[in-house]
Amino acid sequence: MSHTIVIFGASGDLTSRKLIPALYLLHKKGRLPESTRVVGVSRTTFTSDAWRADLEETTRKFTGDSFDAAAWTEFAAQVYYQPGDLQDSGDMETLAGFLNELEGGEASRIYYLSTMPKLYPIAVEMIGAAGMADQSQGPRRVVIEKPFGTDLTTAQQLNSRVHKVFAEDHVYRIDHYLGKETVQNLLVLRFGNSIFEPLWNRNYIDHVQITVAEEVVVGRRGGYYDTSGVMRDMVQNHLLQLMMITAMESPVRFDASMVRGEKVKVLQAIRPMTGADFAQNTLRGQYDGYLNEEGVPSNSQTPTFTALKLWVDNWRWQGVPFYLRSGKAMSCRTTQIVIQYKEPPLTLFEHCESLEGNRLVIQIQPAEGLQVHIQSKVPDAGMRTRTTDLDFRFRRQFAGDLPDAYQRLLLDAIQGDASLFARSDEVELAWGIVDPILAAWNSPAASPLMKYEPGGWGPEESTKWMYKQGRQWFDVC
Ligand code: BG6
């Protein structure tokens, strides 16, 4: 069966920066199924040739040394453009006719929604109304970019409108963090090895830290970012995804239903915050200079940093806090998960530095790999010890660049594997965790918005907050 990927929002940034380069690189590596075609749809009037020429330029830019003119020409021959307004039923019927003619029979189709988020429900309804969600001529799947709603209510409304046209099995909600090799490797680390899992619980682990720090400021995205802030932009999706994979039980099989079933149980076990919890367990900050960003109101209270302490009420994790932290304008770009083990029950040796329990540091990016921190004897110094590490880096062990997340996710969507996509209940449960915190933050008493200088690790209070709990952030670039 042939495949068609229909991209709505074809003239947008995501299409040229991520989707087309990923599809082109998949083609170049011979991973795209034979006769896969790409059809771009947007309101801009382009011809297919003009769109191909534009895409060639941007793909050359975004794939760098991996660009190969001959492979591009081959790929571009299967790229088409169809101008149209997805809100216009005439245009959608024309598109349906164009696709049917192009495919000439049975074909599997993906509708990739890369439009403005407010158009997602309309796009899905118009696809349905034009008969394009009819599954009789081959599977019809829809891929929906984040943000999936702006709170629980809007996410539920979106789910319900989408489900009127597509069954859940055909809905692929993207969180690009799940496409990262190192995030998938976390599943392999935990469930493909036997030495970590026995130690992966409340008996040995003191706490878990999940940090997604970005050096960048919001820049030109101020208009969008200010309505979103760090909770909606990063925590509801990327950080909770990392937390689910860190905390989940082993699935019985590696398939979409089992994996997502286990992930959802983690969200269900997160203890809801009430009353004083918001003041004690949440921090929020805004970097100095944010108010001068283009598109940001001068009195904006939108947080660009947060630190949260969450509890997972189940047998494995009872009593183990999960610290989640994310911010813009931080010291460096790093995404890492730190599993902090308890200290040994008895101190027999003298330490060079302060005593540290073992630590497993999972580097999601950019220095992809992992380190196990262990105490070692300092040579020729009696029985003094120091923290040293066992260091695994992807780049040392494997040749070639790690593929961009979109390659894996697009291929999975083409092949009908939804394991690395968010399910409807997962997205709604995640909003159910984020919404009460956002509501509490409407009252400054819950957790005042603290200013922080760009280039550090967020508000000073964040460091003090950890010290008060007898812990410290593991801040390493
Ligand atoms: C996006 C957010 O989802 O993820 C951005 O909207 C953020 O604000 C980006 O910068 C981070 O992604 P990555 O892959 O660079 O860590």
Image (tube, rainbow, N blue to C red):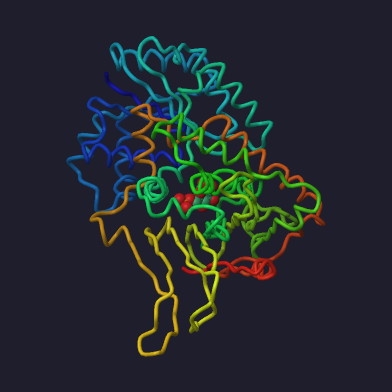
| 23 over 276 or under it: above or below | above
Q: Is residue 323 left or right of residue 86?
A: right
State the residue in front, 382 or 442: 382
- Number of callouts in the render? 0
Q: Position of residue 325 (x, y in %)?
A: 59, 57
Quarter where residue 393 is shown: bottom left
Q: Is residue 186 left or right of residue 323?
A: left
| 375 over 225 or under it: above or below | below
Q: Residue furthest left?
A: 70
Quarter where residue 140 is shown: top left
Q: Position of residue 355 (x, y in %)?
A: 53, 76
State the residue in front, 308 or 23: 308
For residue 393, say whether it is visible: yes
Q: Position of residue 392 (x, y in %)?
A: 33, 62
Quadrant that contains the N terminus: top left
Quarter where residue 157 is shown: top right
For residue 17, say whether it is visible: no
Residue at 41 percent across and 89 percent down: it is 382
Q: Is residue 39 left or right of residue 155?
A: left
| 300 over 236 or under it: above or below | below
Q: Position of residue 118 (x, y in %)?
A: 60, 32
